[in-house]
Each structure stands twice: as structure tokens, then as C-alpha cells.
Amino acid sequence: MAENSNGSSKTASVIIILVLVLVVLAGGYYLFMYKPQQEAKEKARLEQIAKEEAEKKRQEQEAQKKVKYEELIKNADVAFAEENWETANSLYAEAAALLPDQQYAKDQLALVRAKLDELAAKQTPGTIETVASPTGRFYVVVSSSVDGDLAMDYANKLAKEGNSLKIINPSGTNKLFHRVSVDDYPTWDEAVAATSSFSAFGEGVWVLKY
């Protein structure tokens, strides 16, 4: 009977040890393999959801930007056609900042700013000088008038547009005309060559040696 009891005790001990080993192994598997795997899967799932939501939000924002861009361009084009340069500049600049990859807004903005620079240059009053005696230079003349006041009025008008001028008073063989010159040169050839750049003053541009 004692031997049977000892055998049963040993068997029970072995079973208990095996159970404990299995529990430890199961716990280790859960803690170091199963749980980390599940946590990693859950993390990946949540990251994927967040990524999809972020992409959806980005697409919605891009769509809103595109609608806003098209509205800005439409209004800017209207301002451009009406030569409302300040408004066009503001709208094209906003559109270019909104969608930097769109070339149209950048190109139009460059055109508008060039026009604004041109107008700014013209808005800077030019100077008016009086030439009372011969200088030996060649003057590009855009106007002749027997009335000195009319010549000065015309010169003032051109000066307000940013032109620097010289008024050649009557003297010598010219006892009658007051001439308005937009530029002068040391040689005849230079003066004649320059006349084409003053075509905006009309067909009556000519060269006078004085």
C-alpha cells in the first residue's frame, strides 16, 4: 500500500509540474508572442484607418482649393480685362500661393506686375529743361508750336507720364517755333536710330540739330 501511495504521489507531482510548465509556456506565448502580435495588428489597423482618413481629408482640401483657385482666376481675369491692375495683382498672387504648381496664375501675375512697374515709372514726373542757345546736339522733336504756353502745356503733360523733356526756344534762324524734344544725342545717326523708339508720340517725330 505504501508503494502504491508513493507512486501516486510521484505521478501527481509530475502532473502538477507538467501543468505548471504548460501554464508558464502558455503565459510566455501570450505575453511575448500572441499579445505583441495582436497589438501590432491593432496598431497597423488604426494606422491604416488614420492614413485613409488623412488622405480623404487631403483630397477634400485639394478639391476645395481647386474650387477657390478657379474662382480667384475667374475674378482676376475679369480685372485683367478691365485693366484693373491692382485687383488683378492681388487675385493672381492669392491664386498662385494657393496652388503653386499651376503655371497660369504665375504667368499672369508676371504680366500684371510688369504693367504695374511700367505705370509706376510713368507716374514718376519727368523733368523739363529749356534750351535757349545752340548746343550742337541732335534733338528728337515730337512737337512744334508757335505758342510757348502750348509747348509748355504739352511738355507738362508728357512729364506727368514720366518723360524727361527739353523745350527748344526760338533763336537764330528759327524765330517762330517752340520745339519739344524727348531726347538728344551727340550724332545725327544716333538720333535718327532712336526715333523708332518714340513711335508712341505719332508720325511727327523728327531730328533737329541745334
Image: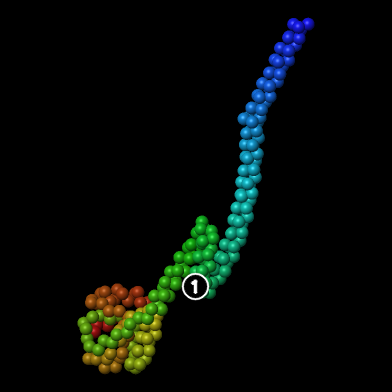
In the picture, the quarter occupied by the N terminus is top right
Horizontal side, residue 193 vs residue 3: left or right = left
Three-letter amino acid code at the position of disc 1: Trp
Residue 202 visible to the viewer: no
Q: Which residue is mark 1?
A: 85
Picture coordinates of residue 65, whole percent (x, y): 59, 59
Q: Is residue 73 above or below residue 175?
A: above
Q: Is residue 105 above or below residue 142?
A: above
Query: Which residue corresponds to the image point at 45% horizontal and 65% vertical from the top-left?
Result: 110
Exactly how many numbered labels are in the figure?
1
The one of 67 and 143 positioned closer to us in this rendering: 67
User: Residue most toward the front?
Assistant: 2
In the figure, residue 70 lies in which quadrant? Answer: bottom right
Horizontal side, residue 11 vs residue 136: left or right = right
Query: Which residue corresponds to the image point at 35% horizontal and 74% vertical from the top-left?
Result: 197
Picture coordinates of residue 95, whole percent (x, y): 53, 63
In the figure, residue 7 lies in which quadrant? Answer: top right
Picture coordinates of residue 151, whole percent (x, y): 35, 89
Picture coordinates of residue 169, whole percent (x, y): 28, 90
The one of 130 and 19 positioned closer to us in this rendering: 19
Horizontal side, residue 194 vs residue 94: left or right = left
Q: Is residue 42 above or below residue 21?
A: below
Give the image's coloring scheme: rainbow
In the picture, the quarter occupied by the C terminus is bottom left
Query: Which residue corresponds to the image point at 70% horizontal and 15% vertical from the top-left?
Result: 14
Query: Which residue corresponds to the image point at 29% horizontal and 85% vertical from the top-left?
Result: 129
Q: Secondary structure at mark 1?
A: helix
Residue 124 visible to the viewer: yes
